[in-house]
Image (cartoon, rainbow, N blue to C red):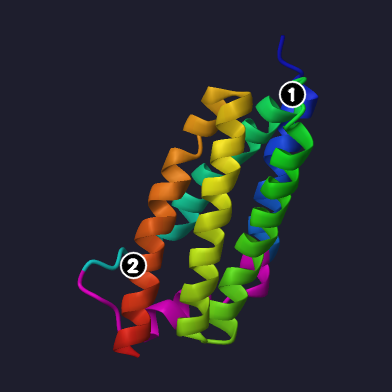
Amino acid sequence: MVNIKSLIFNIAIPLAVGGISSILTRNSMEIYASSNQPSFAPPGFLFPIVWTILYILMGISSYLILRSKSDLKFKAMATYALQLFVNFIWPLIFFNARMYLFAFVWLIILLILVLIMTILFHKINKIAAYFQIPYILWLIFASILNFNVYLLN
């Protein structure tokens, strides 16, 4: 049985993290548009759409993990919280500080954390892990994009 309040709360947490981060980087799309971009760079309007979907999937995954009785639950959720923090900081480094190389390294750290989190999630609930596949794919793409922005700027 699904606890709707708990599910909504778990979805709200990553959405809030993303929302606060976007407020702190409110000029990010202007910065993004003004930087030299590789030919494969998506339009700026796509980023909030993709991130909203990814944050919703993260929230659903965390809900599935929290309701489990696994001994790995605490470790998985601690990794989840850590990757959310690292996720929160990346736009500040990339957009506000414009430290593109450091942002790339930070993004690789985030990707590693998400891979670890996904492995832990998989041991607890396979569906929760599968919901992270789009996130992993997006982070790989974002890493390539970030590195190319660094090279071009």
Q: Which residue is mark 2?
A: 144
Residue 52 seen: no
Residue type for callout 1: Ser
Point out residue 47 in the picture as x, y percentages from the top left corner. Answer: 44, 59
Of the pair 66 and 71, the residue shown nearer to us = 71
Q: Which residues are magenta?
A: 21-39
Q: Quadrant of residue 57?
A: top right
Mark 2 or mark 1, earlier in chain: 1
Quadrant occupied by the C terminus: bottom left
Q: Is residue 2 above or below residue 106?
A: above
Q: Which structural element holds mark 2?
A: helix
Point out residue 40 in the picture as x, y percentages from the top left corner. Answer: 23, 66
Q: Is residue 36 above or below residue 74?
A: below
Residue type for callout 2: Ile
Q: Residues within 10 Å of mark 2 (few under 14, many from 20)?
A: some
Name the residue rendered at 79%, 26% in the picture.
5
Left or right of 99 in this view: 20: right
Point out residue 120 in the picture as x, y percentages from the top left corner. Answer: 61, 36
Name the residue rendered at 47%, 31% in the picture.
130
Left or right of 117 in this view: 136: left
Q: Which residue is mark 1?
A: 70
- Give the residue at the far top of this rendering: 1
Real-space Cα separation, disc 2 to disc 1, in angstroms: 35 Å
Q: Quadrant of residue 34?
A: bottom left
